[in-house]
Image (cartoon, helix red, strand yellow):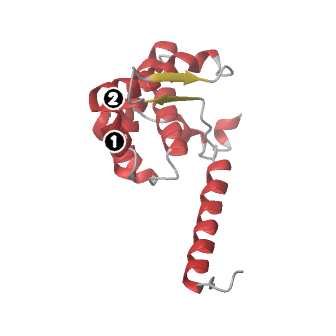
Amino acid sequence: MFDCMKVRPVFVVALLATAVWGGRVAWQRAHRAARNVAWTTCPFFGPPVVKMVNDIPWYDTLVTRVHEEKHAEQCRQLGPVRYRLRSLTAAGKLSVETPAFCAAAVARLTVDPDSEYVSDRLHTDMIEGLSDIADSAAIKAALLKECPQIATQPRRTRARLRPRDAANTR
């Protein structure tokens, strides 16, 4: 019955390599610090659709909405095919996400005018959200190019990580 079927070692190795790679990518995405709280779909027919989960903290709702609306604007400008193609490469994904993160940072300034906090969240959110496609140096360079007025602000986390002097703790 199965006499004509031969096991081809090359195909078995390719199948195993694909399964291992897929498992690794799935594990990395499941264990990263960032989680998806909203997403924008760019359908072939009709306007872009923005969906948000319902457990976003109140102080992040406006910021998330602005981020996703920027993606909807990009969808309308590029069209569904170019929008999808742009997301296939790391550089393309970075070019789509950077303006959205910068727009969200500007919106965060209306919620909390502390520019150090906004700069800190901008860097942290983007590095955590895109850690699987770009390193932090590439992300920081993209932020400095897209929104230097926020990305160049001092960041609080740097000061908090420094050990205190014994003289200043009294």
Q: Secondary structure at mark 2?
A: helix
State which tag comes first along the sequence, 1 or 2.
2
Looking at the picture, how far across and down is residue 76, in whole percent?
Answer: 32, 25
Residue 28, compared with residue 15, is above or below; it is above
Q: Which residue: 35% across, 34% down? A: 80
- Name the residue furthest front: 1
Asked if residue 53 shows in the view, the reply is yes
1 or 2: mark nearer the eye: 2
Asked if residue 152 shows in the view, the reply is no
Q: Amino acid at mark 2?
A: Gln
Residue 96, compared with residue 19, is above or below; it is above
Q: Which residue: 47% across, 16% down? A: 113
Q: CA distance from mark 1 to mark 2?
A: 11 Å
Looking at the picture, how far across and down is residue 59, in whole percent?
Answer: 59, 17
| Residue at the disc numbered 1 | 95
Choose top left, top right, bottom left or bottom right for residue 11.
Answer: bottom right
Choose top left, top right, bottom left or bottom right for residue 51.
Answer: top right
Looking at the picture, how far across and down is residue 112, in whole percent?
Answer: 51, 16
Q: Which residue: 40% across, 53% down? A: 137
| Residue at the disc numbered 2 | 74
Do the residues under discs 1 and 2 have CB atoms within 8 angstroms?
A: no
Residue 68, compared with residue 167, is above or below; it is above
Closer to us: 40 or 157 = 40
User: In the picture provided, is 161 more to the left or to the right than 88?
Assistant: right
Q: Amino acid at mark 1?
A: Ser
Looking at the picture, how far across and down is residue 75, in whole percent?
Answer: 35, 29
Q: Quadrant of the C terminus?
A: top right
